[in-house]
Image (spheres, rainbow, N blue to C red):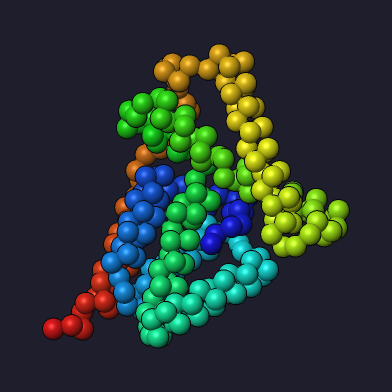
Amino acid sequence: MIGAFPSARETAVHRLHPFSKMAVGMGVTVYALILVDPVALFILLAFLLCVAGMAGVRISARRWLGLLIFFTIFAALNFSASDDHAHALAYCLRLAVFMAAVPVMAATTAPQEMVRALTRVHLPPGLIVSLLLVWRFFPVMAAEVREMRQAALLRGRRMGGVWMRFYRGSMVPLAFAVVEYSDKIALALEIRGFNPGARRSCYALPRFKRGDAVYLALAAVVCLLAAGIQWGGRP
């Protein structure tokens, strides 16, 4: 859901510890699976959107329109299957929480910060490098897909039907881009003599600060409020 990159200025959300943002993102995602009340789910979604707004994440009007169309279709399909407005709305809000929780964290956390945080918990070096490569893979591939779509528009839409355009204009070039990305990473690591087990130093290690405590406490309050709406009125 959060597809745009944050603004260039660093905000208070950017300065939070990566583990704080990871805990809130994953916790809210799991918590959304438990809630079924649309109002409770809307509170979680509103909290995530407020965090995204504080972080300077901006979504274009075109993307908002695309999300609106997608969720309208999704809600209509759920309503046709369940014949229940509340059920359909709850599923839409739950999906929106899923689409917003982790991307908010990813859009405000630099890869090097995540690596530094993971280094502090003494994970295997090979696992840390793999996580870093995966963390950087999706933004790079998203940029590649945008370039492919622009190139396809410049060449015209004379490649057959919709599925053929999607296959020839996106899937085939993306497969080659993934292979090229893997080759470049492997060659770069080999040329530099990279050793994942070597000892490294860094200028500033991430530390838990007062802002992290405030952020975690605010997330806990939001979850308690959602729980009160979900179960507070029941005997």
Query: Which part of the image, by quadrant, shows the C terminus?
Result: bottom left
Q: Give percent across and percent down for residue 96.
A: 46, 67
Whether residue 50 is visible? no
Q: Quadrant of residue 86?
A: bottom left
Residue 189's place in the image compared with 75, above or below, is above
Q: Nearer the viewer, residue 96 or 18?
A: 96
Compared across the picture, whether 27 is left or right of 92 comes to: left
Q: Give percent across and percent down for residue 221.
A: 29, 66
Q: Give percent across and percent down for residue 38.
A: 37, 78
Q: Quadrant of residue 45?
A: bottom left
Residue 98's place in the image compared with 21, above or below, is below
Q: Nearer the viewer, residue 164 or 100?
A: 164
Compared across the picture, whether 147 is left or right of 96 comes to: right
Instruction: Tell me the residue at 50%/49% (across/down).
Output: 106
Instruction: Tell me the residue at 37%/59% (across/down).
Output: 29
Instruction: Tell me the residue at 68%/68% (across/down).
Output: 62
Residue placed farthest to the left in the image? 235
Query: How many numbered marks does the figure carry?
Result: 0
Residue 72's place in the image compared with 52, above or below, is below
Whether residue 160 is visible? yes
Instruction: Tell me the residue at 69%/52% (across/down).
Output: 167
Q: Give percent across and percent down for residue 5.
A: 61, 53
Q: Nearer the viewer, residue 58 or 82?
A: 82
Compared across the picture, whether 219 is left or right of 191 comes to: left
